[in-house]
Image (tube, grey):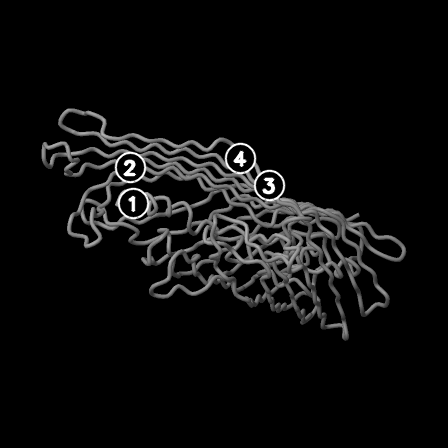
């Protein structure tokens, strides 16, 4: 029973950590114009932020350009309903939220005689969770659930997940109707997780000393620290075609992959039981895992496997000089999958079979297979006056995780998100300033408790407020 309680409480931390990055491919829109259009930017990517969507759009840039944007406020929330029952028989709902400020994008474009190049730095995803939960919940000492007990639960949860990409892009314009572009980004990801929990309860037990059944106190505290620093690359190729003046068609394909993965872990656990009548210690144990460090790299662990392949096909319709409509379709094909703890599956080279077929992780081969995912985005831009643009967008953000069914265990959150965006600004021939917001949300299912078939309804919400500026010269 005690081990079961431990697994369940640890499950609050272990499951469902990946709200944006692993379960949804659309995390943070890069650039103000693309964000205002809901990410439908593949056929219109003529600014510095366009390299994130289609590097071929650089070739249609009219001049040198400098751009800077930031998500002034980023809010993410996961709200899990009826995780436990409190001692007063009311439901215990668990909420995780992240509130942060992040620099989102910096870019610079330079035109040359036969090509256009750019240097960009972006932060396509960032999460900071810092939460504390305290409640007295009802649990049971037997599998038949006939011996209810009140268990005080104290939880401290801290989680950080940031991704940075930086590098050059280049585009060529063989003729005025066709362009091709390429990007090569250095990719850095930093993940930190701190779990701390304390629980205690009292039970009646016979410890075999001849004094019969009497109260016994149980106390347990656990803490765990994990850190991953992952280095990799992200390659992207794109084309853009303008068959007629009022239509632009863009296509891009990209694939990020990891090259080196540095992992650090440290954990402690202390468990004690004592007799309540005389406070004599019945048993006491503790375990400590000092800092462990492992480095998985390209040569031995198959980290050169792409994480996923992203393809985008976009259309831009220029209604007139002041109004345009954009439409994008995205296809994400996962290559690597997640293990039962939400970590990427790694493989080791097998010399006998000449393939990467040995799973590395937690002594288990179980994993959550990721699904091929498709999304769409639509955008509308209108210059109310020559200096005041208004942009509106709509997009889907479907999950790549498997649908949770009765009897499933340790499944990732299953939430399909729908989103909208808007932005307005002021622009002249040489500068622009924009302000806007992106909101997305959805309702789905989750299994936040590890090792059980229970599932909960989960609500996911993400909101970003951004501001940006640009200068042409």
Residue at screen point 19% across, 44% down: 87
Residue at screen point 15% across, 35% down: 208
Residue marked by disc 3: 229
Which badge, 4 or 1, is on the more N-terminal residue?
1
Whether residue 6 appears in this view of the structure is yes
Q: Disc 2 to disc 3, how far (Cα)?
A: 32 Å
Residue at screen point 83% across, 60% down: 172
Residue marked by disc 2: 199
Q: Disc 1 to disc 3, how far (Cα)?
A: 31 Å
Asked if 199 appears above or below 381 in the picture, the reply is above
Give the number of the disc on residue 292.
4
Q: Disc 4 to disc 1, how far (Cα)?
A: 26 Å
Given contact means CB atoms under 8 Å apart, are the residues at marks 1 and 3 in contact? no
Q: Residues within 10 Å of mark 1 (few under 14, many from 20)?
A: some
Foreground disc of the pair 4, 1: 4
Residue 331 point in image, percent of width and height: 60, 67
Which badge, 4 or 2, is on the more N-terminal residue?
2
Q: Disc 4 to disc 3, how far (Cα)?
A: 14 Å
Q: Disc 2 to disc 1, how far (Cα)?
A: 9 Å
Q: Nearer the viewer, residue 130 or 438?
A: 130
Residue marked by disc 1: 5
Q: Would you say 436 lies left or right of 211 here?
A: right
Circle 3: element type? strand
Q: In the displayed image of the protein, which residue is found farthest to the right?
A: 113
């Amino acid at each position: 029973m005690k081990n079961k309680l431990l697994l369940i409480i640890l499950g609050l931390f272990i499951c469902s950590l990946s709200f944006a990055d692993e379960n949804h491919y659309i995390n943070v829109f890069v650039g103000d114009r693309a964000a205002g259009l809901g990410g439908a930017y593949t056929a219109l990517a003529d600014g510095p932020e366009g390299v994130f969507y289609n590097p071929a759009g650089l070739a249609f840039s009219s001049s040198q350009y400098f751009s800077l944007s930031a998500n002034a406020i980023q809010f993410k929330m996961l709200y899990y309903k009826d995780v436990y029952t409190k001692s007063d028989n009311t439901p215990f709902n668990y909420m995780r939220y992240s509130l942060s400020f992040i620099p989102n994008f910096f870019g610079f474009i330079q035109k040359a005689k036969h090509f256009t190049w750019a240097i960009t730095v972006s932060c396509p995803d960032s999460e900071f969770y810092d939460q504390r939960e305290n409640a007295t919940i009802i649990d049971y000492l037997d599998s038949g659930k006939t011996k209810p007990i009140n268990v005080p639960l104290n939880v401290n949860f801290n989680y950080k997940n940031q991704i940075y990409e930086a590098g050059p892009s280049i585009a060529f314009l063989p003729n005025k109707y066709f362009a091709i572009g390429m990007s090569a980004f250095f990719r850095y990801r930093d993940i930190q997780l701190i779990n701390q929990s304390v629980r205690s309860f009292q039970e009646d037990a016979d410890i075999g000393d001849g004094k019969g059944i009497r109260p016994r106190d149980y106390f347990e505290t656990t803490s765990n620290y994990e850190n991953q620093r992952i280095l990799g690359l992200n390659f992207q190729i794109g084309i853009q075609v303008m068959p007629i003046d009022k239509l632009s068609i863009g296509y891009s394909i990209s694939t990020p992959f990891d090259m080196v993965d540095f992992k650090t872990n440290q954990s402690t656990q202390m468990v004690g039981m004592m007799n309540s009548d005389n406070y004599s210690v019945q048993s006491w144990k503790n375990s400590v895992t000092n800092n462990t460090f492992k480095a998985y790299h390209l040569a031995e662990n198959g980290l050169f496997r792409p994480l996923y392949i992203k393809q985008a096909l976009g259309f831009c319709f220029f209604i007139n000089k002041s109004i345009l409509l954009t439409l994008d379709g995205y296809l994400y094909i996962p290559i690597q999958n997640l293990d039962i703890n939400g970590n990427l599956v790694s493989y080791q080279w097998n010399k006998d079979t000449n393939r990467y077929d040995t799973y590395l992780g937690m002594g288990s081969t179980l994993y959550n297979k990721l699904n091929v995912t498709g999304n769409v985005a639509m955008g509308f831009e209108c210059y109310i006056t020559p200096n005041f643009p208004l942009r509106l967008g709509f997009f889907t953000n479907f999950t790549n995780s498997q649908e949770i069914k009765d009897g499933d265990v340790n499944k990732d959150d299953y939430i399909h998100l729908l989103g909208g965006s808007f932005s307005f600004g002021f622009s002249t021939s040489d500068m622009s300033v924009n302000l806007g917001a992106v909101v997305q949300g959805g309702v789905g299912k989750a299994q936040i408790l590890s090792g059980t078939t229970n599932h909960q309804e989960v609500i996911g919400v993400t909101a970003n407020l951004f501001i940006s500026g640009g200068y042409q010269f």
